[in-house]
Amino acid sequence: MSSSRLETRAAVSTVDPPSLAAREATLSPDLPHRLPFHYVEPLTMIADAVAVLASSLVSGIAYHAVIFDYRGDATVFLAVGVLVLANFCALIAAQHNYRPTALINFGRQVRFVTLTWWFVFTFLAGVAFTLKIAETFSRGATLTFFVSGWAGLILSRYAISRYLKGALERGGFAERRIVVITDSGTASSREGLINLRRCGFLPVRTFEISPSEMVAPEISKSLRRKIDDVISLCQNDAIECLMLQLDWARSGFIETLTRMLRVLPIPIHLLPDDNVASLLKSRPVTVGTSWTLELRRAPLSRFERFIKRTIDILGAVVALTVLSPVFLIVPILIKLDSKGPIFFKQQRNGFNGRKFKIYKFRSMRVLEDGNVILQAKRNDPRVTRIGKWLRRTSIDELPQLFNVLRGDMSLVGPRPHAVAHNDEYQKVVANYAFRHHVKPGITGWAQVCGFRGETQTLELMEQRVEHDLWYINHWSPWLDLRILARTTVLAYRQSSAY
């Protein structure tokens, strides 16, 4: 099965088509010559080159003309654009984001283009600083290039996504003449041909093979006549491709058929049958020397985990520096208010369910960490006087910045629950375990949406889990920054913090 074939089916499946009859009516074989489907990827690369190089030249020249009253050196601006473009395209291609299956998903494009664009600029700025050549480039022109290039790429991806969706819905790609060989009376073949026609594949003729012809010990005369007709048609009618839509369980017959057709110098593709079609929508991955299908990917790619970890480390270091006076004053207040340690430590479940010790400023008179742990309630007698203030302002959570630096937690993610509560909710809340697909956070989407503190009913916990899963599925650096900003604003106003 070729990768282009898998790509074609996946691309079609992302569009919500009308009824089968209506779709057949919209796919006329007399469409004018239009863009070939396999041109989408290289043309997108060209669009990226235009957006990046034009942004580099225009922003550099315009900035110098406005600020310094001269145009500057266009060759320098072009060289910077080429350097950024080369790194950007290499990373986007490595993530398979030039494939039509990825391009049609505008949300995915915004996420990956933004992450890659920011990473390229951060990396190249670091290199320029290390080599002490940063003063060669105007900071204003560079910043203008960063913003305009990013905006140009996003607008380009939006236009491409809209075009792909429209072209797939109306069958607007250039035609490629094909011949189809299928099982006799196969119901799925009709739907499969419609999907092919959406991507520009025009079936000139369909040959049906009966079950008796497939199971015969030797090649029957009727089968041989059909194959001769296929060969004659392909040789005389400029056929570009042969499509086989047969039961994959008949591997022996498929091999025999392929040998009989080897006289033809055109590609032969085997379409997925009903048993494997859903599996083949998964991403192909090479593991060692073996080819596999990735039936479930990690919630975040390696690159995304790198970006998130970078944000965590930088954010934690900055927060600890800025809040260092708090870390000096709060321990004194805790010691003056009640007996006991300054820090409260408790086992929690982290990434992949692994246990770790979470740190907090002690806000209670008890240090519960066992099989039975009571959630804090309003006017809870266990909470100390200074503890009420610490919990209301979320200052008690600040020592978790050390958990972030250790790698146990992230700044943003699903809030970790006590092990006893974790074990309890895993049994009664659907998909609860999926919260452990990312590192737990000091704050999270559920918390800034109001689901913080005591969960008096099962419905409240289910809603918290739904928000956590939404965060995992829609993660982006911008979402993390948005949650951190909202956490800062809401820190003193959440009535559920007690």
Image: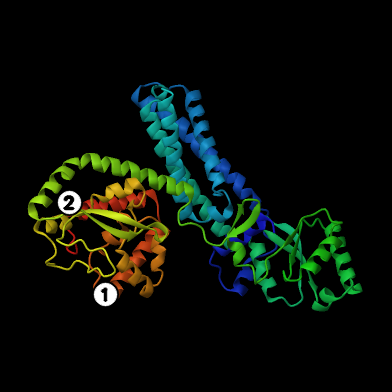
Amino acid type assigned to the residue bearing label 2 in the image: Ile
Does residue 259 appear left or right of residue 66 in this picture?
right
Q: Which one is in front in this view, the residue at disc 1 or the one at disc 2? A: 2
Query: Residue sitting at 37 percent across and 70 percent down?
Result: 426
Query: Residue sitting at 46 percent across and 37 percent down?
Result: 120
Does residue 387 appear left or right of residue 287 in this picture?
left
Point out the image quarter for the C terminus. bottom left
Give the Cα distance between marks 1 and 2: 32 Å
Q: Nearer the viewer, residue 114 or 318?
A: 318
Q: Residues within 10 Å of mark 2 (few under 14, many from 20)?
A: some
Amino acid type assigned to the residue bearing label 1 in the image: Thr
Query: Residue sitting at 31 percent across and 51 percent down?
Result: 482
Residue 133 image position (x, y, % from top left): 42, 22
Residue under pointer 2: 342
Q: Secondary structure at mark 2?
A: loop
Q: Secondary structure at mark 1?
A: loop
**Residue 263, above or below 69:** below
For marks 1 and 2 on the same chain, the one whose residue lies earlier in the sequence:
2
Q: Return the residue found at the far right.
A: 221
Residue 27 showing in the rendered view: yes
Q: Count the numbered circles shown.
A: 2
Residue under pointer 1: 457
Quarter assignment of residue 249: bottom right
Residue 308 image position (x, y, % from top left): 39, 47
**Residue 75, above or below 221:** above
Q: Nearer the viewer, residue 348 or 151?
A: 348
Point out the image quarter for the N terminus. bottom right
Query: Residue sitting at 87 percent across and 71 percent down?
Result: 223
Residue 282 image position (x, y, % from top left): 58, 61
Q: Residues within 10 Å of mark 1 (few under 14, many from 20)?
A: few
Quarter assignment of residue 218: bottom right
